[in-house]
Image (cartoon, grey):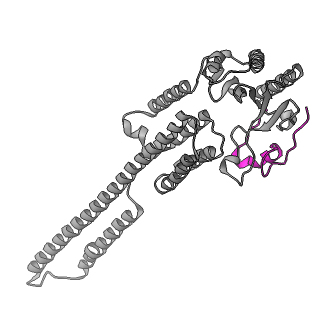
Amino acid sequence: MLKNKTIRDILWGLLAYTIVFIVPFAFLTTFEFSDWKYEPFVTAIIGTFMGGGTIAIITAGLLVFQKKLDSEYKRQESILNTRIELYLDIVEQISGHIKDGKITPLEKDNLNAISFKINLLAEVEVQTEYEKLLSEINAGEIDDAHIASKLNDVIDKMNKSIGVFESIDKSRTKKDIRIAKANIKDIKKSRYSGYKSKEDLIESKDHDVSENVKALFDEIHAEILKLEDVNDEEIRWTSTGGLTAKCGKKKFVGLNFHAKGKKLEIMILRDEDKKHIRPASTSTLDFSDIREYSPQKSPSYIVPWGAEFYKLMVSEDTINDEDKKLILGLIKDGHRNVLQDTYLKVKEDEHKRLADIFCKGDEAKASPWNL
């Protein structure tokens, strides 16, 4: 693509040519050279010089134009090649960390340092997505599935930045590209779907799971399946997310084993009837916001990941029947919010609403309600 300066230079050249070689012809009608004996000779000489000058100017203009095009092409090619190398390095590093299941402080520092290269070479869209990914990584709570999802968002922007879809096959229609993207999405979904059942999930753990915790897990799982528009075949089992259940297409609860199988971690959708505020902890039930609301601290805390949920931790030696009823009631409240479409939805430009919902964070104002 031509830069504005190149186009401007071409226009100035055309204007100069017009003034020097074309405008003077307008004055020829005011002078009579027909009675001058040297007129044929002078006319021939002027014509020769005019023609030669025109050719010289056009040739020079074309050479300058070609040189600028060649220079611009080489510059763009160099930037593209450097971008591709940088993008590959980023994807290889982060995907390796996801595979390992951990990111050390030194590795975080390396990923932060790469952001300077991203700011130098990448487009604004890629910079934005990469900064969001870094914010999630630097937040300290590494969720492999979530980081993988964020990495895929970055890769999508990288694809557009280097024109991957368009450059593979120019003959492909937009419909073909949409189908290809849908196929890729299905592949990603199957790749991160994890296990087929709770047994496979437990077997994947490198520690034993408490029988009390396992029994509570089974009881909650059975009650979830009784709820409206919940399909057992749509329940996902992953090493990081445990059990994830949806009502229709919206997740409303997540269950996972924690603290080497001695605790059950439950993510519950916030309830509009309680102004989306989480319950207060009791002697046996430990409630908390998943992430804090501190928009001045980090971009990832503006609309924190999982903002529409709160977290409950239950220990193996404190589980009782009364607590089970309370837990199931809270899960059903979250499910009801999906059916009624009243669950929490917050856009980035509306994030200040979270101050009256979150109990944790520099700008959080809410107080938990008592069960």
At horizontal 48% and vertical 52% (from top left) the residue drawn is: 122
Figure check: 100 above or below 300: above
Task: Pick the residue in front: 169 or 4.
Answer: 169
Q: Is residue 44 within the magenta segment? A: no
| Extreme residue in the right direction | 370
At horizontal 67% and vertical 51% (from top left) the residue drawn is: 298
Task: Pick the residue in front: 37 or 65.
Answer: 65
Figure check: 335 above or below 358: above
36 left or right of 26? left
The quadrant of the image that shows the C terminus is: top right
210 left or right of 282? left
Give the x, y percent position of residue 29.
24, 78
Q: What is the quadrant of residue 232 in the picture?
A: top right
Q: What is the quadrant of residue 201 in the picture?
A: top right
At horizontal 52% and vertical 50% (from top left) the residue drawn is: 110
Give the x, y percent position of residue 346.
73, 42
Report the magenta stretch's main SS. loop
230 left or right of 1? right
Q: Which residues are magenta?
A: 342-371
At horizontal 11% and vertical 85% (from top left) the residue drawn is: 36
